[in-house]
Amino acid sequence: YGKNTIKFLRLHREGKKHFVKEVEVCTHIRLTSAQEYLEENNSLVIPTDTIKNIVLVLAQKNGIPTLEQFAIDICKHFMTTFYQVAYVKAYVQEVPWQRLHENGVPHIHSFICVPDGIRFCEAELCRNGPLLVFAGIKDLKLMKTTQSGFEGFYKNEHTTLPERSDRVLCGELFCKWSYGECRNFDFDCIWYTNKIRECILEAFSGPPDSGEYSPSYQKTVNRIQMLILSNVSQVQVIEVILNNIYFEVIDMKNLGLTNDKEVLIPVETPYGSCTCTLGRKKFLEA
Amino acid sequence: YGKNTIKFLRLHREGKKHFVKEVEVCTHIRLTSAQEYLEENNSLVIPTDTIKNIVLVLAQKNGIPTLEQFAIDICKHFMTTFYQVAYVKAYVQEVPWQRLHENGVPHIHSFICVPDGIRFCEAELCRNGPLLVFAGIKDLKLMKTTQSGFEGFYKNEHTTLPERSDRVLCGELFCKWSYGECRNFDFDCIWYTNKIRECILEAFSGPPDSGEYSPSYQKTVNRIQMLILSNVSQVQVIEVILNNIYFEVIDMKNLGLTNDKEVLIPVETPYGSCTCTLGRKKFLEA
Amino acid sequence: YGKNTIKFLRLHREGKKHFVKEVEVCTHIRLTSAQEYLEENNSLVIPTDTIKNIVLVLAQKNGIPTLEQFAIDICKHFMTTFYQVAYVKAYVQEVPWQRLHENGVPHIHSFICVPDGIRFCEAELCRNGPLLVFAGIKDLKLMKTTQSGFEGFYKNEHTTLPERSDRVLCGELFCKWSYGECRNFDFDCIWYTNKIRECILEAFSGPPDSGEYSPSYQKTVNRIQMLILSNVSQVQVIEVILNNIYFEVIDMKNLGLTNDKEVLIPVETPYGSCTCTLGRKKFLEA
Amino acid sequence: YGKNTIKFLRLHREGKKHFVKEVEVCTHIRLTSAQEYLEENNSLVIPTDTIKNIVLVLAQKNGIPTLEQFAIDICKHFMTTFYQVAYVKAYVQEVPWQRLHENGVPHIHSFICVPDGIRFCEAELCRNGPLLVFAGIKDLKLMKTTQSGFEGFYKNEHTTLPERSDRVLCGELFCKWSYGECRNFDFDCIWYTNKIRECILEAFSGPPDSGEYSPSYQKTVNRIQMLILSNVSQVQVIEVILNNIYFEVIDMKNLGLTNDKEVLIPVETPYGSCTCTLGRKKFLEA
């Protein structure tokens, strides 16, 4: 059981300059016993209200140095403080506030919400087990208007899809990777130094002056995974989900027009989805 | 990979009387090879467009006798037709259309959407593995305004929650159970004969003239599971998630009023969540 | 300015039997002056926090006899209490809780949320003006699977729609009517005695054994308005919006099948919309 | 009646460089007669399917030079082509695709969705009436963490809000302005030359090194309106809605901590709302 969607803003001031982190936290725990469930005995149950208080107290005391470190702090606190906790998981997601700029000058205390991909992380800890840390980005919506096709696929009597060598590729990306057993990483340093977000965009779109041909969603997913694994040594396993939105070139012949891929209609449902998990050495597909 | 949210309406006519099933289907498959992912070779890939066509063709040919049977039909079709499929899962969810009645008389072709709980099911099949069938109900929002409390819980310096022996219990239920390895059940017969929905409502609310005291969300979840397991012999394992919405009795003293649990405010976030999975003989808590 | 989405539950007890009304209230006011806006002088501004307190206090003191009466109470309170208020509007919407029944016996304190149409109302009052009261129902999703067509429409070179004499008619209804200047009606009595909801369903669907042919969305909207105006003498003007969801009979010829209106796909966007406002004597179309 | 949410992507190519505009269009018309509504005669009704075709044909033929010009094209087409149309309104909203950059180099055909404010416009035309054009931005979420307060407001027995001279101001902005009767403006030129978006951000946040104190939401709304009216001569009237999200500084005394505005909780409902419409010379508040 646990407490979901604990939302708060952590405000940090250095002189007149303000820094903000607004986050949503979900914390789940499992107890070593189940007597509240079986015997109406609540004596070991930590109320979800207390879980919320602990998350807020940790935020006030430690701040949020990085999302990952905050998730780790939560896990360690529960495991250290409560002997009856067998397992704890903390998920932290950030509201994408960015500092406002006026004519290139950063504003000391004004921010704008720019949701072009949401960073999140997850830490989990079993009693006597290793600390596992995951991080990721979700709700990242990308499109390339050419250099994508889908040909040579399996056909039978239920196939109506034509082969296409030039289509629009549009999708929403979810990427989640594991840092393996945690070794006191500086997680924001890894994120910024290794340009993880930039890797994803580059693997999706290819060189700026030409792009790179994508023969399938599967191959694009693979490119994203390969580039992150090769650029970020701390990443052990990476899962990518690409939910694609198909853009249909509508036939305008009966309206007396030729539509040379100029007007396309998004088909939102049904949508295809492609999920892959790629790890070092071993290979897993889910 | 797969195709999500394939929506369609299956209309069935018996003379002038019409019957409707509107469903959303998600179908996911895993192939035995990954050459499209690694080598840009799509020759074994079944396009998601073909997956959609197959679902619609099966609906046209077989109709939707029950949600579960339709999910099974999909799984079996993919496993039988495509040698390259290693695993297939079909999720089917129903739009809750109900026949309209005028002064008690059922209308032959008019329907109203009544979303007081959504039925869904899932079937999955590995090559050479057993057929697994799950069913459930979700988005079922219930409230009891008394006969609920939470006392005797674990306390420390982060505890601010008072003990309460009379609170409002309100939550959204998700129940999913397994029928184990499928043995050609008549799934709607099980649903209606065993009154599964009625079991859930009864276990939540207790006898109509008195209710039954709930000492915790956990215990209420346990009662729901126990009643279904004892009433429905075909159910093997049952998972229940109760996302509770806390109603706060607001203090009106500074407004010159005594509020004797007459005005309460829903606290939508953060919300507590309680998940349990209960099986026959063995006991699992997640 | 005002306060939106003030949500609360009003619990009323008669012995052991409980009655609930959960509502969402939006209250907007306009002041006679604009000095806070022009001159940074807040001395006449009623904080939205105070607006919220007043709504909760009125709920505690008066209860919610009917949605309409509660909206009227709010308007009258603001106009009577604050000389600086020039205009006030209160919108009240109900969460559709229904009492649970077990084998036909009503439960004394357990409820289920059944969102098959949401009742709402609106009251507004200008200083020295009449009290206006509106009521309505929204999010009412209906479907008829035959007895609907669309023929004989205007055609030109941009017309691709075929004439159809048998289609599925599905839509979401919004109905809002005016009670004119308020004369101390018993609003729930009007609602239940005149069976307003039943009128809407009947005008949409026609007789249960045969239905009634709808030659256009416009005509169906007109039938709903005419039936309410003729059955409910207190209603002065009625506005109906019908957002229709088109169900497309998919062509399965290239899949080797004949699809005799058995498998249909909902087209959610773009959707057609039809709005009409009909009053007694005078006729308005918006 | 009309057609809502016609979504499409207009792709324009200059050599290898691609330009995209994805829009949602809603088009509503009113006919000079109402015979389809009263007499089941559809002979003058333009099907919503035809409305959709016309929008797509115009997009293919003319492209979308600016959102406003495209809305004007739609209005003019309907008024010129159909003698039975008495009134037409077109609303156009843009999906916020931005060109991807890799190390500062713009990509020729890859884009990312960045929803930090959505541009929209509206054109309307009555037969024999002037063409009216509106434009705006919505879903712009801003926050300033200081330089905001609310003091000296009206108090009575229902007041519980304390006076505050340093609070977080956070809200979602909706701005819509009128260009009066259209005089063949270059609308994107007005938008970019006059830096309308930058005006809004600047009026909200004040100078980057100090900010500007906001004594109320009302005054902030007024500043935004005044700055746009003074910078953009073509704007006649401007309406601003600020839906504010209140951040509550939680009291941590009972948790043994002093919370000096470091941890704040967003209160999403109820939320305050402030709407003002400001025109040249005349002053309107709604």
Image (cartoon, coloured by chain):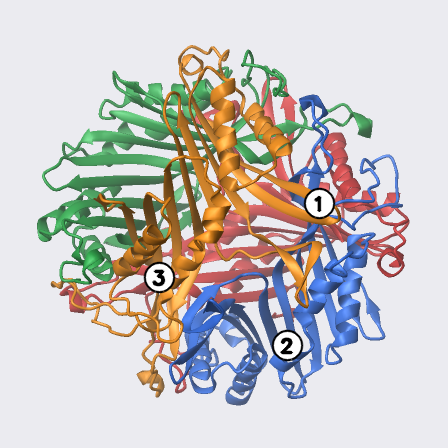
Chain colours: A red, B blue, C orange, D green
Q: Nearer the viewer, mark 1 or mark 2?
A: 1
Q: Which residue is mark 1?
A: C14
At mark 3, the secondary structure is: helix
For residue D252, which quarter of the picture? top right
Depth order, front residue of C138/B158 = C138
For residue A176, which quarter of the picture? bottom right
Check the image and report above or below for D279 versus C171. above
**Residue C51: percent from left, percent from top:** 55, 26
Residue at x-position 39% and y-position 37%: D138
Check the image and report above or below for B161 versus A258. above
**Residue B178: percent from left, percent from top:** 70, 75
**Residue D223: percent from left, percent from top:** 39, 19
**Residue A216: percent from left, percent from top:** 44, 68
Chain letter of disc 1 in the image: C
Chain letter of disc 2 in the image: B
Q: Type of residue at label 3? A: Ala
Q: Which residue is mark 3?
A: C203
- In which quadrant of the rendered image does the C terminus of chain D lie? top left
Q: Which residue is mark 2?
A: B192
At mark 2, the secondary structure is: helix
